[in-house]
Amino acid sequence: MDLSISAAAHMPVDSASDGSAIRFPVWAQSHSTRWRWRQSLIHHALEAYGRGEWREALRCLDLCCSLPIPATEDLLFRSEVYGKLGQSALSTADLEAAFAIDPTLPALQMRMLHQLWRSTDEPSRLVQFARRLVSIDTAPAVLRFCLTRVLDDGTWSGVALTRISGSAIRILLLTKSAEDVSIEGRFSGQRRQVVTRTSSNHDRASVLGHASVVEMPWPEGERSVALSSPGNSLWWPKPWHGRPWHQHTSKPTGTPIVPEGTNSALVTVIMPVFDGLAATQASLDALLDEHASTTRHRIVLVDDRGPDPRIPAMLHTAAARAAQQGFELKILRNPANLGFIASVNTALAAFPYGPVVLLNADTIVPPGWLDRMVSAARKLGVGTVTPLSNNGEVTSMPQMFTSAPMPSPNVVRRIDALVAEANRGRVVDVPNGVGFCMLITQAARDACGFLNDLDYDQGYLEEVDYCLRVAEHGLRNVCACDVFVGHEGGQSFKDTKRALVVRNLGELERRFPSIRRDTLRFQTEDPLADVRSAFQLDVLGSGIGVGSIALEVGSQASTRHMSATPQSGRDVPVILVTPIRLQPDGLVLRLESSTLLAPRQLDLTVSESSAAAKELAALLSAFRVESVLFTELSSVTEPLFSLPALLGAPHDLRLTGSEFGDGLFAADLLEGARQIETVSPTLMRLAHRLGRDDVRLEKPRASQAPVLSRPAGDEMDAAAVAVFCEADDSQAAELVLQMARSFLVDNLPWYLVLFGRQASPAMLATTRVINGADFDHDRIADLLRLHATHASLCLMRTKNYEHPVQDLLLQTARPLFSLSASLVEPLDIPADDLIVLPHHVTASAIVDALRKTVPVPASLML
């Protein structure tokens, strides 16, 4: 097996008039659209690939793959280049990412098969993947290779592949020899049979030698079928199928369980159940314990035939409990695993009248939730209603599109009580609802019918499609700001979630081209910003769900990479307090935590005077603060020094020594500290003079990897600069952008490889910035080496000596430019290789410094 990459696959747009290579990355300057920009990048990547210049090709492809959803072909191409550079792990990662986006690409399928065939000693893995491909649209060559492996043991004489539409079942039969095949379709109320003979003259006979295609119509009213061939030893990869519900009709059709007009005011809560026994049990407990809502409703559980045999019994136990409590609870059982969308549509057809709530089986609802959801639905023109949640995409708290840990049922109830009081009756229009808990009004059902099970695979984003159709009919999608529902997320599909989301997102954008723009506008305007800020203050002020915490005041870096303060003796949540800026109305502090529901990122304005510590201590009064760790006194305003005394907590110091130069060091804070760590021998000597002989002198862990050497002379094909900066440092991001624009305007043959954050669209548009990796990427050192940079620029303003960037700085290319002297001081970098930049350096000054210290061969000057 082999993979060849052809320029025809990418349709190049422009080329150099003299046929010579155009040096990276000037070629995209004249292209105004993303499509032409990408096509030009691919064209020059292909040229570089043909010349054997793997790194040149990689730089082009890194730019292409920096798009939010990169093209499958680009990931496949970059995978091939990684392979040429000997980076098999990175090559495989790109193949898997590409397969998640579009598993139907024949070249990708062959490359995946080739990778397994070449690298594994376990034939079962190759056979397992081949089985998976057989059920996907594949080219005859790929299908032939897969079936050769699957049918190799002689168990089956051929395969039956099915394609389903709303009117018929199409079956493709592939056999090794001519066979008379009788196919039986077992529907719920009848059986159908079709007979055919496979032939060597069929256009798909090249796969196994013989083929035939037959169709079986769907009988009226039938929703599922089991297919088999009793007289033949054929392999049926998927014997059960459901008939698509979604026909883009204006009103649901089907056989209802309740006749029209009966209980039409009843709200139907639909919960599909597939897997996740514990999460489903907790969800059912919360639903059945809900006695506060006065809204008349029924519960419909749809058993989607999951892998856990205990689930049916659990559902029947829930039904018996509901009957005792006076709830109406129905169980619908699919004949086979048909997926989330089909399960919901089955329930919609069975109960076609009245509002419905789609509720995931991994949610926790609080008391009174349904009353408030229905109240929101009664507002003018509402089509769908979605509550706030810890994991609700557009309605996520405390950060939009960011999931937070699932709270316990008790915490969900307490949070819900807070938002119900703070946001009583408030709704906010959103681009779309979210299906973990979404109420659909009767008006929306009349307008839009079923969920779209024709265009979306299994689940994810089908509810967004529904909401966009709701909006097309002039109805509103709103968030009920006075309801909070807990949501675990990912229970049904687990590891396949990303693949489903990426695949379905492409279909969503095809059907609704404006969805990305509308979502970006919503994020920019952020009408839920005040709700989230108030949410964080309320949750933080009440101390919900947490007893003890530790504070870290100063550096932003270390808390992100530690689970607890080292002095605590046990794991406790850590809240980072960082002074951000002074403004006329006071001091702005940023409160962050990676483990608590709040604060995730909360900017709090306090008095600039000594009252600052009192205001912060009052906010944290609901917690038991076990310790306060000061990491940089130079970044901490003096009023915050009184925090430990106000909180009644011991304090510790982790200092760099730069506090002396800044004139902010407080000797009394040093004397009263419980423990002190430092990288500064000077500070250690001072502590000894103050009677502190217990100060620990720490040094950063030395890297075992050698320092990257700079390519010399003709080996240089472009001047690459590694840039290290924090993800949320807007000043550093602006420096990167201005440097890239300067490279472009001055025609300098340099580009920046960004580590620690993702390049912004404006950076990518310059074609002089490409993404390296986040600091927590498990192969960041390999990526650093792979780009063979010629200089390094550290835009980290932190002085914290435990930051993981220090290990990279020990091995990155020299010279090293750094904004923080104390960050690099402990690294013992030779003076000739280190250039400390002024704290308020400009982009033009950095570019000038690069010109003087990073020589570029004349052959690269453009």
Image (tube, helix red, strand yellow):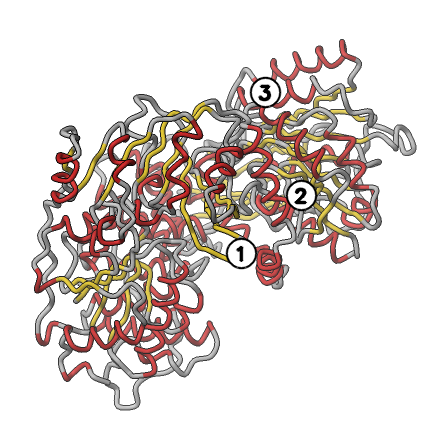
**Cα–Cα span, label 2 and label 3:** 31 Å
Q: Which numbered disc, 2 or 1, marks the residue closer to the eye?
A: 1
The one of 8 and 770 positioned closer to us in this rendering: 770
User: Mark 2 vs mark 1: which is more N-terminal?
Assistant: 2
| Residue at which label 3 appears | 282
| Crowding near the residue tagged with mark 2, few <14, some 14–19, many ≥20 C-alpha atoms within 10 Å | many
Pick the quarter of the image with the N terminus. bottom left
Q: Position of residue 571 (x, y in %)?
A: 35, 24
User: Mark 2 vs mark 3: which is more N-terminal?
Assistant: 2
**Cα–Cα span, label 3 and label 1:** 34 Å
- Residue type at mark 2 is Pro
Q: Position of residue 367 (x, y in %)?
A: 71, 24
Q: Residue furthest bottom?
A: 18
Q: Circle 1 — which element?
A: helix
The count of marks equals: 3
The one of 662 and 743 positioned closer to us in this rendering: 662
User: Mark 3 vs mark 1: which is more N-terminal?
Assistant: 3
| Residue at which label 2 appears | 244
Is residue 246 visible in this depiction of the protein?
yes
Residue at 32% in and 35% down = 562
| Residue at which label 1 appears | 506
Q: Viewed as shown, does residue 183 lie left or right of 704?
A: right
Q: Residue furthest right?
A: 261
Q: Position of residue 61 (x, y in %)?
A: 32, 65
| Crowding near the residue tagged with mark 3, few <14, some 14–19, many ≥20 C-alpha atoms within 10 Å | some
